[in-house]
Amino acid sequence: MESGSDAVRTQRRNGVVHVELVRCVVDTDLVGELSRLVGDLADDPSVRAVVFHLGRVQYGLGPAGRLDRAIAELGPGEGMSVLTRLEKVLAALERLPRPTAAVLEGPIGSIGLELALIADLTIAAPDTVFYVPGPERGFLPGMSLYRLARYVGAGLARQIVLHRTTVHAAEAQRLGIVDRIVPVPAQALGAELSRLLSLPPAALNLARQMLTEGGPMNYAQAYESYKAAQFHALHRLADDGAPDSPPELPFSAAEYVTAPIERWIDRDVVPGSPRQDGAADAAGVLRRLDEAGIAGAVLYPANVLWAYGRLHGEPFATLLRRYNDWVLDLCAGEEKRLRPAVLLDVDDPAAAAAEVRRTAAAGAAAAVIPLFPHNEQRYDSPRYAPLWSALEQGGIPITLHRGSCRHIGADARPFDLALHRLDGEDHLFDQVFDALEGSYARLAVVAMILSGVFARHPGLNVVIVDFGLAWAPYSLLRLDEQYEVRPERAGPESETSQLGGALAGHSLPAEHVGFHFAEGERPSDHFRRHVFVAVDDDPLGLELTDILGPRNILWAGQLSPHRAQEPDAIRRMRTLSNEERITVERRNAISLYGFPTGGVAR
Amino acid sequence: MNGYSPVDPLALGFPVYSADSHVIEPPQLWTSRIERKFQHWAPRVVRSEDTELWVVGDDIRMAVVGIQAQAGRRYATAPDREKITKRGFYRDIGDLDPDRYIKDLDVDGLAGALLFPSNAHQAYRCVAGDLLAAIARTYNDWVLEFCGTHPQRLKAVAMLDVDDLAAATAELERTVAAGATGALIPVLPRAGHRYDQPTYDRLWRTAEDLQIPLLMHVGGNQAVLGREPTIDLVRHATKDLHVQASLAAMVLSGVFARHPRLRVGAVEFGASWSVYLMQQLDRVYTSARRPGSLPQGDLPSDHFRRNIFLSFQEDRAAMLWRQVIGVHNLLWGNDYPHAESTFPRSIEILRRDLRGVAVEDARRIAGDNTAEIFGFARSGQ
């Protein structure tokens, strides 16, 4: 009698059921087949023995990690269900009142090890190698750790699982996992099985039960421990997208505080509904960080950035100074976890430089400059040199943050965004501006790079917050392409913008008046050295880390208002490796903002 | 472009078409052909200092001769390397006739090319009214004749003056009947106008009915009327923002909901910027408090993918994101004979940028999409 499926083939000869595992992937199909089979065996008194065959042809290990992915892709719910059912099958086989045997050849994965450990008789070919799954998969290799420890002792099991991961046939025989090693195991099976079947059935079953249930922790206890540990492991795998979280908590490049602006400014000036979703004191921020599992954060205002688009002159500068004093005071004494970003009015670069020096002395860790400054004074203008110097000397990175454009209003048209606001309410203009606001951050860094700001200020860095990551690859390609192909265009705008309209004499501007990069250097090199992008999660952007990689990415826990209002707003980088995540979530923040390198007490 | 040898036209295993190539208008194109009443203001070539210039109207500078015919210089190495410069003279360019064009297609390994102007569209920025319409008509007649000499390999893009929409639709109908397979419109229309305004529906409807794509090409921008073209490198490295703003306005206002068969192409702006724009349009649209302009269940990115295609020269990020953008929306172009051109290394560059791309996708991006949209013979035909 023969039957079979994609996962399992069975054959019955003289009361012995031979079960051939066709593939190595522990999945719903395989476990379902085995579960049905074991149920049938238990109910069938004519079955004398069960033999599992795991051959090198049918049971090749397949691509490395296939097993891991099969379970990991099921998610914690179904993954746990499959693994629990598998363990039930194995436990039932272990307690089956009939002899069981395993015949092994070639490389053997986790389910082969499980079967070898529960079978009464294991016969292996000389080239059999057990690949013992270790914790690198992110979840437990079933109950095989428990069984392996019982067979070989906890110390040896630890060595095998954590440090070696392979056990060859000869060693397996010494450890008692394999009973016989023969060139053709199937040929030796008949004689060995006959010997087992000749033993008194009742005594054999009793002996097996004693062996199975013995030991310092009984099976039921071990099984409960295993289920709890496995459940935890699978959830972590699903939540984090990687087997192990970074060993320490992440730093967030952007969290928000709500400042008491009603004390500083006439309510009539404040726009409709600025964000009010940040904490208003250090205790509130720290509570939020603790709840979210965040080691420390750079703090921005939830309700002040609007002023960049609406206020001017002394009222504007005063509001920013008051906010700066307030946030510096809020972070005082909590420097290891809370790092304040101060707000700069760059309309007067010398005054902005003075504010940098003042706030740096009081603990400022970052400085916001408007996405686009006043009067189309782009950041390639030399007027900002004193500000760049002050920031560089203070070791304070610049922040370009959503919502901080100067003068984006009815009459403003920075750098030819060129989509005209129509008279009256113009929601379409507002929507297009909202969609393209990140372009101003891009323009800012492009202007700085192409005018050589980073060559003159090699200690200066820029962090772009809340615009995602997917804008960056094209920007880098375009920067290099334009510089490579059209270097004659390099030059500050001030030298070329006078040339509109009818031209008396048709004179042309001098060529090659701008910044030229060192031989072999490209504009994108400056981007990669000096520009960072803070995002919470951007799967598409993270697909192209070959173009802009983890070295330039920061993790931010709390970004846009609509996301911050969601209870599960804390998202983590799902597609990065552990090492990349440590760079994104910790190293970059430590390097830019001076967070402590060790763990942070909570 | 002397000194180059032809490349195997099937070097990649399928025919390659450029969705973005250029003719160079002869110096007497307008002065010899435009209606008499416009002759005094027609585009003409003048000499100034160390270069020739195109001027129009009341001596408004329209373009500089030189950079338009420097294909290949970017790949030259010392000591032969000649600097890429805006400056130049017609006498150094050589033959401008269609047969020479075909020879250079062969050198570059191309089966055919869609032809845009090098100078005519600069007039969008400089003049308006009857003069602009006459400049467009004159150019259209000439470029249709130019392509008519090799109709299987050269396809003409007509140029439209969209200030007068009745005249624009009539010119679109006329030029399509004469063989044009695409029509150029300004990236952004004149100040105070936007393509989301219903007045443009007439043009959209005509293009839709004629199944003719409307094309926005780098440099063809009316919104900066009277200003010097953006010769500043910072602006050049970010000039896709104009087409992003224009397309965003069209998508969000529901132009493509009202005209589902209208196709618009963004030419020579690259392509990978569209991924971020689609993300942002969807974010803005779904977070808006007021009802949107799109049919229930539609997202802006759905319309972007359905109605907009993008031409690029070198954009590896777009190749990696091709499924997000839509393989059928990506059209390669060589920008010949401009300085940025991939000529004469187009096949080599395509091979580099298409590495890892499935052959059926590569075939679409490098040729079949352009063939399908602009009426060239597709591979296997």
Image (tube, rainbow, N blue to C red):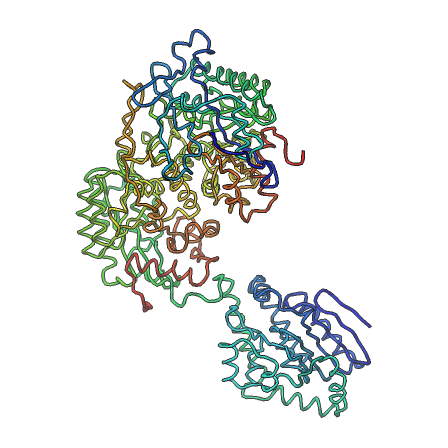
Q: Residue B69: image x %, image y %?
A: 43, 28
Vertical side of B172 occupied by A230: above or below: below
Hey, which quadrant is residue B14 in on the image? top right
Res A195 seen here: yes
Asked whether A143 or A492 is in front, the reply is A492
Q: Residue A415: image x %, image y %?
A: 33, 33
Hey, which quadrant is residue A18 in on the image? bottom right
Asked whether B253 or B18 is in front, the reply is B18
Asked whether A235 or B223 is in front, the reply is B223
Left-right relation of A295 to B304? left
- Image point 68% across, 84% down: which residue? A121
- Image point 52% across, 68% down: which residue? A137
- Image point 47% across, 58% down: which residue? A574
Q: Residue A532: image x %, image y %?
A: 35, 51
Residue lying at the far top of the rendered structure: B36
Left-right relation of A601 to A351? right
* Circle count: 0
Q: Quadrant of the C terminus of chain B?
A: top right
Hey, which quadrant is residue A433 in on the image? top left
Vertical side of B286 occupied by B48: above or below: above
Q: Residue A461: image x %, image y %?
A: 29, 50
Left-right relation of B224 to B261? left
Res A602 seen here: no
Asked whether A381 or A235 is in front, the reply is A381
Vertical side of B103 occupied by B358: above or below: below
